Amino acid sequence: MLFIVKSYPLKAVAIKTLQQAFRRADSDQALVLIDDGVYYAQQTDGDLVNIIDASENLRRSATNMFALQEDMALRGISDSVSKKLDHDASSEHDTSSITPVSLDAFVALTDTFYPIVYL
């Protein structure tokens, strides 16, 4: 299943949908931040994983998190996210790092994961 988060902040219904999906994570899933959703990539406190209370479920499942590079660049957050991701990658305990992806890689994700849920 592919979750595409395009708004910031998320509405309560979207948060509930993500919480339920990650609790029953029985297959490979991916979450992609696009449009204003990429603002979640730069947060340090109250990040998306904490908001949807999914840190334990992410450890157990094969969930990957991505952010569209073009949208990050348009919002001027690509540099800060790159530094944060370098720091997060060095942390053993962080399972919620977000990988920047190109538009081509995003399209490939839509071919790989089905169904697609827009939030």
Image (spheres, rainbow, N blue to C red):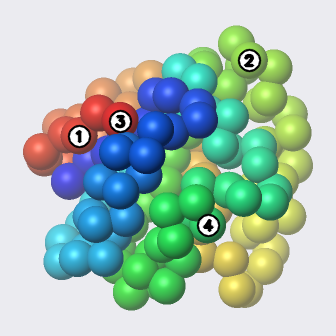
**Badge 3: few (under 14), some or many (20 or more) residues near its Cα, within 10 Å?**
some
Residue type, label 4: Asn
Instruction: Give how far across and how far down residue 106 sits, in percent.
Output: 38, 32
The residue labelled by disc 4 is 50
Query: Which badge, 3 or 4, comes first in the chain's sequence?
Result: 4
Question: Pointer 2 and pointer 4: residues touching (CB < 8 Å)?
Answer: no
Question: Pointer 3 and pointer 1: residues touching (CB < 8 Å)?
Answer: yes
Calculate the distance from the C-alpha at mark 2 to the C-alpha at mark 4. Answer: 23 Å
Query: Which badge, 3 or 2, comes first in the chain's sequence?
Result: 2
The residue labelled by disc 1 is 117
- Which residue is pictured at 39% across the width and 25% down the height? 104
Calculate the distance from the C-alpha at mark 3 to the C-alpha at mark 1. Answer: 6 Å
Q: Give the camera-side residue of 57 and 112.
A: 57
| Quadrant of res 76 | top right
Query: Which badge, 2 or 4, comes first in the chain's sequence?
Result: 4
Q: Secondary structure at mark 3?
A: loop
Q: Is residue 9 above or below residue 99?
A: above
Q: Which mark is residue 75?
A: 2
- Which residue is pictured at 80% across the width and 74% down the height? 90
The residue labelled by disc 3 is 119
| Quadrant of res 58 | bottom left
Instruction: Give how far across and how far down residue 32 sits, in percent.
Output: 44, 42
**Badge 1: few (under 14), some or many (20 or more) residues near its Cα, within 10 Å?**
some
**Badge 4: few (under 14), some or many (20 or more) residues near its Cα, within 10 Å?**
few
Q: Is residue 81 above or below residue 18?
A: above
Q: Which mark's residue is nearer the viewer, 3 or 2?
A: 3
Query: Which badge, 1 or 2, comes first in the chain's sequence?
Result: 2
Question: Pointer 1 and pointer 4: residues touching (CB < 8 Å)?
Answer: no
Give left or right: position of 81 versus 74: right
Q: Which mark's residue is nearer the viewer, 1 or 4?
A: 4
Calculate the distance from the C-alpha at mark 1 to the C-alpha at mark 4. Answer: 20 Å
